[in-house]
Image (tube, rainbow, N blue to C red):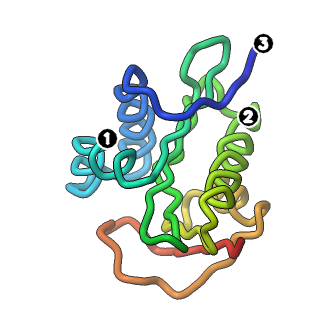
Amino acid sequence: MEVKIVPYQSQYKDDFIRLNKAWLEEYFYIEPHDMETFNTIEEDIIANDGEIFFCLVNDEVAGTVAMIKTNDALYELAKMAVDKKFQGMKLSNLLMEACIDFAKNKKAKKIFLVSNRILKPALNLYTKYNFIETPMDETDYARADIQMELNL
């Protein structure tokens, strides 16, 4: 089995949307800000010095995550999703490591994320990589009830 992490390629845009819609619809609902993100991936993330990573298993898109630039020192880790049939393979670890390496290469000082406390596997992943809970800033997501940061 070949597993690799690749940066954004437009041919995978629909996979980014598909994977994220799947978990959003399973646990919550798709919010207006989600749709805005899906509709402006290239303009708002890629063209703004951000990145979207994809985890490929035998050339099939198994997972994805976005790094959204807030400013030169801060990136938001967002929209991490792994296809159900690939869960349990620790692919989220590979995606997380790609995000951390990306932020370090960009000389960022911090990565933040917002999540929800019912997403225990996600919170365990963030804690494993030394993200710590911080007070919630204002967010566009109604589902967000926890904010975490990683100082680089």
Neighbourhood count class around disc 3 (C-alpha, 10 Å): few under 14, some 14–19, many 20 upward: few
Q: Residue at x 42, y 83 (%)?
A: 137
C-alpha distance separating marks 2 and 1: 30 Å
C-alpha distance separating marks 1 and 3: 30 Å
Is there any visible trace of residue 116 in the rendered image?
A: no
Labels 2 and 1: the sequence-earlier one: 1
Circle 3: residue type: Met
Q: Which mark is residue 2?
A: none
Image quadrant where one finds the N terminus:
top right
Q: Disc 1 marks which residue?
A: 42
Q: Residue at x 70, y 35 (%)?
A: 91
> What kind of element bears circle 2?
loop
Circle 1: residue type: Glu
Q: Which mark is residue 1?
A: 3
Above or below residue 102? Residue 91 is above
> What kind of element bears circle 3?
loop
Figure quadrant of residue 123: bottom right
Q: Disc 2 marks which residue?
A: 88
Q: Nearer the viewer, mark 1 or mark 3?
A: 1
> Is 21 displayed left or right of 80 in the figure?
left
- The image shows residue 42 at horizontal and vertical percentages of 31, 41
> Is 38 displayed left or right of 146 in the figure?
left
> Is 146 displayed left or right of 10 in the figure?
right
Q: Nearer the viewer, mark 2 or mark 1?
A: 1
> What kind of element bears circle 1?
helix
Q: Nearer the viewer, mark 2 or mark 3?
A: 3
Figure quadrant of residue 21: top left
